[in-house]
Amino acid sequence: MLGNTEGITQVEEFLMKLKSLLCSDGFDINTNLEVQYSPFEDEPGFLNAQTLDDLNYTTSDVRNTLLSLTLQDYSETMFDNREFTAPRFRVFGKTIEKKEVYIKIKIRKRTNSDVFCISFHYSQYPMSYPFNV
């Protein structure tokens, strides 16, 4: 996946749309939010399931963390290398229990799981935050 940064306006628009979806009347956490639990790659110590278990986090906790994201948490935007024309992933970082958590999400239009969180794990490398000045 190639990464790049977007402008403030694009990131703010993404966050507004994300939060609007997560708070909409018709939003069902069980069908409209997909958190990837099985790994695409074997990265011991940096797997979503391990991090969520370590934090004692549920899907509801992931939703609450997504709702708390701000412009300052933004790191980069990445193409989906499995579907190049699909919506891009946005990468954010949050410090949770004194550890940096790498969060990679996108909004997609499907019959379910409009919000797809492919990564929610401890960051393997220090992250950069272009709008955290």
Image: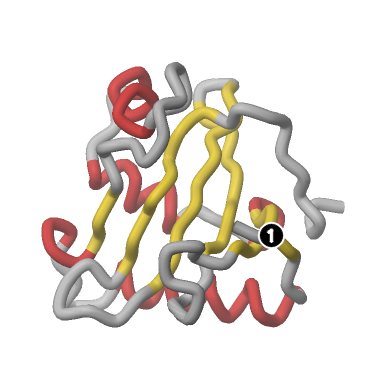
Tell me the kind of residue under disc 1. Gly
Q: How is the image coloured?
A: secondary structure
Rendered location of residue 47, percent (x, y): 39, 28
Q: In which quarter of the image is residue 26?
A: bottom left
- Front-lying residue, 100 or 126: 126
Q: Which of 132 and 48 is in front in this view?
A: 48
Quadrant of residue 29 within the rendered picture: bottom left
The count of marks equals: 1
Residue at 38% of width from left, 77% of height from top?
20
Front residue of 60 and 47? 47
Q: Depth check: 101 or 46 in front?
A: 46
Quarter of the rendering occupied by the N terminus: bottom right
* Left or right position of 48 against 85: left
**Residue at image mark 1:** 3
Where, by quadrant of the figure, is residue 91 drawn? bottom right
64, above or below 113, in the image: above
**SS at badge 1:** strand
**Rendered residue at 51%/22% (across/down):** 97
| Number of other residues with Cα within 10 Å of mark 1, as a class: few under 14, some 14 to 19, many 20 or more | some
**Which residue is located at x 29 percent, y 32 percent?**
57
Residue 117 image position (x, y, % from top left):
37, 54
Q: Position of residue 14 (x, y in %)?
A: 54, 75
Is 35 positioned to the left or the right of 47 in the image?
A: left
Q: Where is residue 99 shown, x and y percent of the image? A: 58, 23
- Identified at 26% across, 39% down, the residue is 37
Above or below 48: residue 4: below
